[in-house]
Image (cartoon, rainbow, N blue to C red):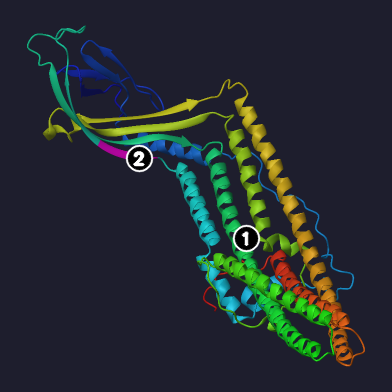
Amino acid sequence: MIPTEDIVRAPSPLHGERAGVRGVPGHGIYLAHSRTLGPFNITRKLVPRHPTLMVLTASLLLAALLAGCSVGPDYRRPATPTPLAFRAAATDTLDLTDTNSLATLVWWQVFADAQLQAYIAEALTNSWDIKIAAARVLQAEASARVTRSQFMPTVGAGADWTTARASEDGASTIPPGVNPQREFGSVYGTMASYELDLWGRIRRANEAALAQLLATEAAQQTVRQTLVAQVATAYLSLLELDYELEIAERTYGVRTNSLTLTTARQEGGVASRQDVYQAQILVSTAEASIADTHRRIEQQENELNLLLGRSPGSPRRGEGFLGQQLEVTVPPGLPSDLLERRPDIRTAEQQIIAANADIGQAKAAFFPKLTLTGFYGFQSVALSDLFTGASQTWQFGPAVSVPLFTGGALRGNLQLAQARFEEAVAQYQKTVQNSFREVSDSLIAYQRNREFRARLEEYTQANRNAADLANVRYEGGVTSYLEVLYNEQELFTAELNLAQARLNELLSVVSLYRALGGGWQTGIALAQP
């Protein structure tokens, strides 16, 4: 039987007497209120003593919670035009309709140089960009955990001991013989304001936080993918500079010998002083090229060390530049697979999901909000009576708030969320279109760089033949040293250009591998080398 009236004794901090506190019957959930009468603090509340009512109340709240709906639109991937095949160079012979893709290869299958593999593995562990991206993922995980905590109430506990004395000459008269000083202690547990997710605001917030977490993880994969390409580019560029230095030093040796020979011929009266000056020009040109190449090599070494998380120094080399082979024998695959493979596209899509969930949060703000607060504990003037039934005190109360007038703030927040969603959709579509362009550019670059390198090899060989013939003609007295000077300079420039063309061909493969979404898979890669 539920009592129609219950009396709770609670000490007043203003007086030593116990105050009579009467509760009134009601229906459902009751709200507490209090008022002060003279030296007594009187709190009026209902105390349901029957456990059935408590279970019923909890059941009703649970039913209301489960019956809640999530307002706002559900996410659907935006429609993005997808070409049937990537655009390649007109002379490309790759099968662009093959479902296989270069991006399905892990990076150590693409880059065969053992030293390069070791550097990539080191960079994926020690690079500052990797550490920054990992810290951002941890931040997103913590933020999602904070958002998810709104599903559960916040429960705390505490204890206190209070000593109070009322003024004997104050506005409230204290009867004679009553001690104006009073001491009492409390032990309690509290439940802070807990919102029932009736309209799905918390669920939408959790959906947005999860999407942000997934977007951050995809961004971390983008950093890994970019780092693999950067390390490969820096390493191959370093090897190419080493090869340029080799060309310059070899040319310097040949020209030094030519200068010695020309000087001897001039001293013997066979050659003119002008021939000696022209030979010295060739030697000085080679010396200047060697000095400048050393500068570029040392700076490139510093760039590679930074990617590896090292201090400036001279990193080791593996296979020579001419031994590097990165031929594209696997087709690029289907454009539709690119949407799932490239992490930057997945990042952009998760941003749409988060923006879509924010619309639901903005719409939920238009509806009433139901929150619960609770308190349970013991209060007594004597420690021995603290945990007795008479010292028990508790309070439970819901609160409903309805937005009536906000000056347009709620509608403005909704419009802001919708505008951000439209921006995220446009950004996603731009990212997708840009990915198609990057793949096409890389395919064209690879094919055209191969063709350009092949023509440049023929051109360099022709210059080499011309330089050899010019030296033979000069030594035979048929022509002046000016012809030798011209052909030697042309040969030196052609050899350097050919080295750069070979590098561009290798880098176009690196660029294609990255554009197709390869290089971010690192779970096995760290242990492979």
Would you say residue 367 is visible in this rendering? yes
Q: Is residue 366 above or below residue 499?
A: above
The residue furthest right is: 478
Amino acid of disc 2 = Val
Q: Is residue 384 above or below residue 497?
A: above
Question: Where's residue 453, x and y in %?
Answer: 82, 77
Element at badge 1? helix
Residue at coordinates 13% horizontally, 19% vertically from top-left? 181
The first of marks 2 and 1 along the sequence is 2
Residue 106 image-quadrant placement? bottom right
Query: Which disc, if any, is residue 381?
Result: none
Q: Which residues are magenta?
A: 154-158
2 or 1: mark nearer the eye? 1
Amino acid of disc 1 = Thr
Residue 297 located left or right of residue 370 = right
Residue 455 on the magenta segment: no
Residue at coordinates 74% horizontally, 55% vertically from top-left? 432
Residue 34 located left or right of residue 194 = left
Q: Which residue is mark 1?
A: 222
Residue 421 located left or right of residue 220 = right
Dominant secondary structure, magenta: strand
Q: Which residue is mark 2?
A: 155
Question: Where's residue 289, x and y in %?
Answer: 71, 73
